[in-house]
Amino acid sequence: MTGLNINEKQIGIARQRAQERGLDRLTAFQFCDCSQHLPFPDASVDVIINIESACHYADRPRFIAECARVLRSGGRLVAQDWMAADGLSEADRKRYIAPLEAARFLHRLDNLSSYRGLLQGAGLRVTKAELIKDGIRPNGYIMRMGYRTVTECGQRQTLTDYEIANRERFRTFSESLLGGSLKVGYYVAEKPRPSPRRVDAAGGMNGGGGALGGT
Ligand SMILES: C[S@@+](CC[C@H](N)C(=O)[O-])C[C@H]1O[C@@H](n2cnc3c(N)ncnc32)[C@H](O)[C@@H]1O
């Protein structure tokens, strides 16, 4: 298993933890900007796990295309990510999503439909794509509590610019999550296997499927 991250400090922590657990011979961790290039040869990877990370990538289509390139046939991309709600108006997007994107280094969040489009466009077969229904609401309540706590502090003392900015992040995050503009979804996408070759009536081999067909 190879763990990739754009943050050297996290890579160091991962290496140390793997070593402490006696897993260092089974694992490798390396620096990588996953929105640019995945450091593996074509068709060499069984499974890619990507948890709440692609929302930060400047070029998500490129990441998905890279996943399609490095997965072997039958290999899977299994992911969970922050998403905008499907069908959100531009006004709601501007009000609830854009401030989060700016504050939390998220790049123009996809929604479940646009994610499907990206995956299919890269030649992957989507076998599952769903939103997490209620499991993320507690995050909204925690953020709302954060907003109220900082607001109460502001009634007793002068807040710094940083504290005010954080209070507003808590507010937007809780409103967008509890109001339904911000979602968490997960998906599984598989790299299709080549069509099985079949013997035609004349005894020749047929691929039945475009470039992957038998010759
Ligand atoms: C919200 S955290 C999620 C971490 C972990 N997957 C989890 O679920 O706890 C996002 C992670 O993505 C990493 N990240 C952000 N942009 C990246 C990029 N372009 N390439 C690789 N990793 C990136 C961050 O350093 C961070 O570790």
Image (tube, rainbow, N blue to C red):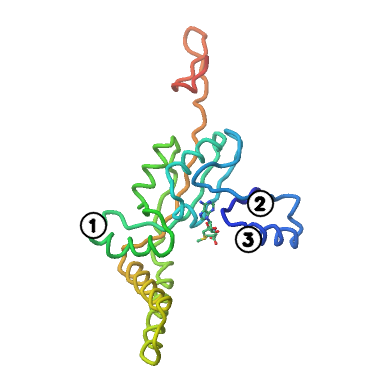
Instruction: Describe the element under mark 3 as helix, strand or loop.
Output: helix
Residue sitting at x 52%, y 24%: 196
Residue that mark 3 sits on: 9
Taking 134 as reference, is 47 left or right? right
Q: Residue 93, relative to residue 154: is it above or below?
A: above
Residue that mark 1 sits on: 89
Instruction: Describe the element under mark 2 as helix, strand or loop.
Output: strand
Residue sitting at x 43%, y 71%: 139
Mark 2 closeness class: few <14, some 14–19, many ≥20 residues within 10 Å: some
Q: Which quarter of the picture shows residue 123?
A: top left
Callout 2 amino acid: Phe
- Residue 182: percent from left, percent from top: 35, 62
Callout 1 amino acid: Ser
Q: Residue 23, relative to residue 100: is it above or below?
A: above
Indicate which disc, 3 or 1, sits on the residue closer to the N terminus: 3
Callout 3 amino acid: Lys
Residue sitting at x 62%, y 51%: 3
The label shown at residue 29 is 2
Taking 42 as reference, is 114 left or right? left
- Residue 125: percent from left, percent from top: 44, 39
How far apart are the alpha carbons under marks 2 and 1?
40 Å
Indicate which disc, 2 or 1, sits on the residue closer to the N terminus: 2
Camera-side residue: 174 or 187?
174
Instruction: Describe the element under mark 1 as helix, strand or loop.
Output: loop
How far apart are the alpha carbons under marks 3 and 1?
39 Å
- Residue 27: percent from left, percent from top: 70, 50
Q: Mark 3 or 1, which is nearer the eye? A: 3
